[in-house]
Image (cartoon, rainbow, N blue to C red):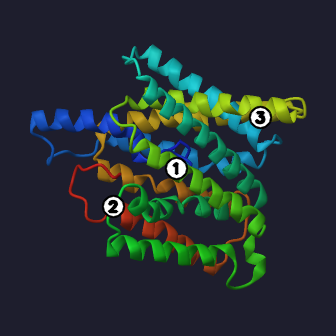
Amino acid sequence: MPVWAFFVSSPETLDLEQLSGHNINRRNRERRNGCMENRTNDRGSVLMLVSSMLIFGTIGVFRRYIPVSSAFLACFRGILGGLCILAFSRLRKRKRAALPRRTLLGLIVSGALIGVNWILLFEAYNQTTVAVATLCYYMQPTIVILLSPLIFRERLTVRKSVCAAVAIAGMVLVSGVIGDSSARGGGFSGILPGLGAALFYSAVVIMNKKLRGIDAYQKTTVQLLSAGFIMVPYLLLTGGFAGEKLTLSALLLLLVVGILHTGVAYVLYFGSMDGLRAQSVALLSYIDPVSALLFSAFLLREPLSLLNILGAIMIIGSAVVSEIRGRGPGQPAA
């Protein structure tokens, strides 16, 4: 989500905090050139961002057909995705600054949180519908809104309070607590890990607010590799590697998730930044959850009741309003 990423995932993509250093440098160049207010969106950049969001939106569908544990998938995705972005950075000869130990430690810890976040999200995809898991995950902006007064001493405005209340009400509708229980799509066994993933990604977003001024590619490489390698001791202790029986089709799908859904999608996402207004990036990033819902309904034939649809509109709509409304042109969305 994207962020919004990510990643990164997509949603599970990265949020725009991942681009803090990238955006700061971009805004400085724009101020020097006097083009801050006249900036327009480049068509190629729009295509790159939309493509990355659509790729992120399909990861839930792919997860359904990969017969490995969520921890193994998170490990494989983090390591392969991180190596892909590292290879891209070296091919493009991007400059890499030496990171202070404290900053490096912060990136490693946030990477570990991303790894846990992925495990919970992948498990949610298995336990409930892709649509419900995605909407649970998109409670992340609401969690950050509610935690910001405690962590950053930020004032909770009326607009943000209303957005949080609307999102929570939407989550109640999505969960199936109200209405026919058949619409729950797996019940709370899938909703709880989805909300847990949102909580852990909220922690990543909060940490990223303190990790500013770092090249986006360098930051993401460290975080993804950390997310993957942190899983190795866990898998060794639990016998996770020995218990996996990989078929050729499963291996190919793992490569798709690692290379396409992580390496390629992140490169497209970051590559689009210089040609887009920050506000446009934030708006277009919501293609990710919307496309995930559509893929869930049309490709997997998963049920989505009218109450679920209303809840989805409330959750995504409140996130859009809380992130976008009230910002001037060219300002970062996070």
Of the image marks 3 and 2, the number of the one nearer the N terminus = 2
- Circle 2 Cα neighbour tier, 10 Å, few/some/many (<14 / 14–19 / ≥20): few
Q: Is residue 57 left or right of residue 61?
A: left
- Circle 3 Cα neighbour tier, 10 Å, few/some/many (<14 / 14–19 / ≥20): some
Q: Position of residue 117 (x, y in %)?
A: 63, 47
- Toward the bottom, the furthest residue is 179
Q: Amino acid at mark 1?
A: Ala
**For this rendering, which residue is in front, 63 or 209?**
209
Q: Secondary structure at mark 1?
A: helix
Q: Amino acid at mark 3?
A: Tyr
Residue bearing the label numbered 1: 203
Q: Position of residue 192 (x, y in %)?
A: 70, 63
Residue bearing the label numbered 2: 154
- Circle 1 Cα neighbour tier, 10 Å, few/some/many (<14 / 14–19 / ≥20): some
Q: Is residue 258 left or right of residue 251?
A: left
Task: Check the image and report above or below for 132 versus 43.
Answer: below
Residue at 61% across / 37% down in the picture?
A: 112
Residue at 39% across / 41% down in the picture?
A: 210
Label 3, label 2: how far apart the Cα atoms are: 37 Å
Residue bearing the label numbered 3: 234
Label 3, label 1: how far apart the Cα atoms are: 21 Å
Q: Secondary structure at mark 2?
A: loop
Q: Position of residue 248 (x, y in %)?
A: 84, 29
Of the image marks 2 and 1, the number of the one nearer the N terminus = 2
**For this rendering, which residue is in front, 40 or 229?**
229
Q: Amino acid at mark 2?
A: Glu
Label 2, label 1: how far apart the Cα atoms are: 16 Å
Task: Check the image and report above or below for 305 versus 216.
Answer: below
Res 132 quadrant in image: bottom right
Q: Is residue 200 left or right of residue 148?
A: right
Residue at 62% across / 53% down in the picture?
A: 197
Residue at 37% across / 60% down in the picture?
A: 323
